[in-house]
Image: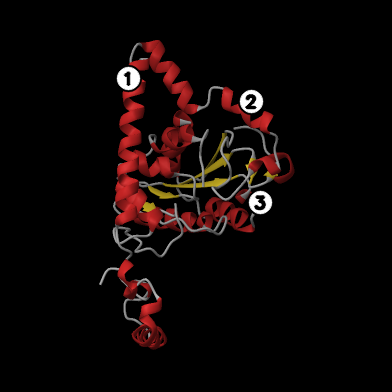
């Protein structure tokens, strides 16, 4: 799941919140976790589903989660996180916890029934939640004009929304107008539904990273030599983490059955016993050496 061209929405929004505020992401908010200090090796571990992955390899790639950084684990079905975010915000209100919830979603997800139910619950229960709609032009292959209708409504807006959400126990919706320059995902070819000229046009515009670079150059805080060194250093750091994650073993097989229930139910125990019996008989046909013992 790519986010090239949308990076400013991540940093601009999360920088305006407190570290104790709870985040419900969709699957493009890697920059939010990065801003909160999530280490590169854990990003890689999650994508590889290896033994270092806090989720123990049970989620698809880029479905991150981190309890310590108040980032709820991402799930794939569209918009399910929106009513969940309202429930969490209602709990904060009842506790008088001085905490807010931010919920990220795309303009496509805003068409799901979950979104409308969540908006209604948040308003009637008066919850301190910020709905952050990332309008990047396309809900997979469907353009915004066919998917969603709204007027264009990031740091100052989110900061004010957070202040009022907590002080007044009111929900707020921030619509971040952006453009997804990259493909929807690594399995997507966006040229099937949009022209290359359109993408090139937006790529040449001042998207968040290039705008920040130009600003820093203008202020005298950055130059081409620093850029060259930073790019080389960053690429080396990423590739080292990539290769390290690739070498790590997968989590223990037993973890397919753990962590869902405080006490494993009988039916799940039977499934585990069945798997172990099967592997005892036919284990040579499986790459068991790839898993931690």
- Which residue occupies the extreme front position in the image? 284
- Mark 2 and mark 3: Cα distance apart in space: 28 Å
Q: Is residue 150 left or right of residue 164?
A: right
Disc 1 versus disc 3: nearer the observer: 1
Does label 2 or label 3 sit earlier along the sequence?
Answer: 3
Identify the residue at image location x=48%, y=27%: 208
Residue 116, compared with residue 107, is above or below; it is below
Mark 1 nearby-residue class (10 Å; few <14, some 14–19, many ≥20): few
Question: Mark 2 and mark 1 in contact (Cβ < 8 Å)?
Answer: no
Identify the residue at image location x=34%, y=11%: 220
- Mark 1 and mark 2: Cα distance apart in space: 27 Å
Q: Position of residue 269 (x, y in %)?
A: 36, 85
- The image's mark for residue 111 is 3
Q: Is residue 88 left or right of residue 2?
A: left
- The image's mark for residue 226 is 1
Q: Is residue 143 left or right of residue 120?
A: right
Foreground: 56 or 287? 287
Note whether residue 45 is visible.
yes
Query: Please, which colouring scheme is shown?
Result: secondary structure
The secondary structure type at the circle numbered 1 is helix
Does label 1 or label 3 sit earlier along the sequence?
Answer: 3
Q: Is residue 37 left or right of residue 184?
A: left
Mark 3 nearby-residue class (10 Å; few <14, some 14–19, many ≥20): some
- Mark 1 and mark 3: Cα distance apart in space: 44 Å
- The image's mark for residue 201 is 2
Foreground: 211 or 92? 211
The secondary structure type at the circle numbered 3 is helix
Identify the residue at image location x=54%, y=48%: 186
Foreground: 74 or 213? 213
- The image's mark for residue 135 is none
């Amino acid at each position: 799941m790519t986010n090239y061209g949308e990076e400013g929405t991540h940093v601009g929004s999360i920088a305006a919140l407190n570290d104790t505020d709870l985040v419900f992401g969709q699957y493009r908010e890697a920059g939010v976790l990065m801003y909160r200090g999530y280490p590169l090796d854990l990003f890689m571990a999650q994508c590889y589903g290896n033994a270092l992955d806090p989720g123990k390899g049970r989620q698809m790639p880029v479905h991150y989660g981190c309890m310590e950084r108040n980032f709820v684990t991402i799930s794939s079905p569209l918009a399910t996180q929106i009513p969940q975010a309202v429930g969490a915000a209602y709990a904060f209100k009842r506790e008088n916890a001085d905490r807010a919830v931010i919920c990220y979603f795309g303009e496509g997800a805003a068409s799901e029934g979950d979104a409308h139910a969540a908006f209604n619950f948040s308003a009637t229960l008066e919850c301190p939640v910020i709905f952050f709609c990332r309008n990047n032009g396309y809900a997979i292959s469907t353009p915004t004009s066919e998917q969603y209708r709204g007027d264009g409504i990031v740091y100052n807006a989110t900061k004010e929304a957070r202040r009022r959400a907590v002080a007044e126990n009111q929900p707020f919706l921030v619509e971040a107008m952006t453009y997804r320059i990259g493909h929807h995902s690594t399995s997507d070819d966006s040229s099937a539904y949009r022209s290359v000229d359109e993408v090139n046009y937006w790529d040449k515009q001042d998207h968040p990273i290039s705008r920040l670079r130009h600003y820093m150059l203008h202020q005298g805080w950055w130059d081409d030599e620093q850029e060259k060194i930073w790019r080389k250093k960053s690429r080396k750091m990423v590739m080292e983490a990539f290769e390290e994650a690739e070498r790590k073993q997968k989590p223990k097989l037993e973890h397919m059955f753990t962590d869902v229930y405080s006490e494993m139910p009988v039916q799940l125990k039977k499934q585990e016993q069945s798997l172990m019996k099967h592997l005892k008989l036919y284990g040579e046909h499986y790459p068991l050496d790839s898993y931690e013992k």
